[in-house]
Amino acid sequence: MKDLVESIAKALVDRPDEVVVTEIEGHQASVVELKVAKEDIGKIIGKQGRTAAAIRTILNAASAKLDKRSVLQILE
């Protein structure tokens, strides 16, 4: 899941070298934390949160194939 989110985020931002993705494995779900440069946060969130929602949808679909649950958190 970490690699998936990282590749999507790097394709969207102006500073792909500043994209940091960490995955915290839990018992029932894993949390994927995404951190980007301050000026790229708007590109990750998108208008009215549509881009962030699309990334979450892709993450949920990929997680469902593996019978897991993943949550995306965008950090500032």
Image (tube, rainbow, N blue to C red):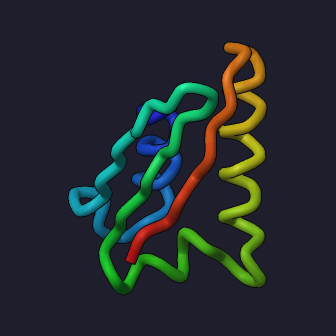
Furthest residue in direction left, as rendered: 17
Which quarter of the picture shows residue 23? Answer: top left
User: Where does the image place residue 75, in percent across and percent down from the top left?
Assistant: 42, 69
Left or right, 53 with respect to 40, comes to right
**Which quarter of the figure is the C terminus placed in?**
bottom left
User: Where does the image place residue 73, in percent across and percent down from the top left?
Assistant: 53, 60
Q: Is residue 66 above or below residue 43?
A: above
- Camera-side residue: 37 or 70? 70
Q: How many marks?
A: 0
- Camera-side residue: 15 or 33? 33
- Camera-side residue: 25 or 55? 25
Left or right, 46 with respect to 39, comes to right
| Residue visible at 73% across and 75% down in the picture | 49
User: Where does the image place residue 58, in percent across and percent down from the top left?
Assistant: 72, 40
| Residue visible at 55% across and 69% down in the picture | 44
Which quarter of the picture shows residue 65? Answer: top right
| Residue visible at 77% across and 31% down in the picture | 61
Left or right, 43 with respect to 68, comes to left
| Residue visible at 40% across and 53% down in the picture | 10
Q: Is residue 11 above or below residue 31?
A: below
Furthest residue in direction front, as rendered: 27
Q: Is residue 69 above or below residue 46?
A: above
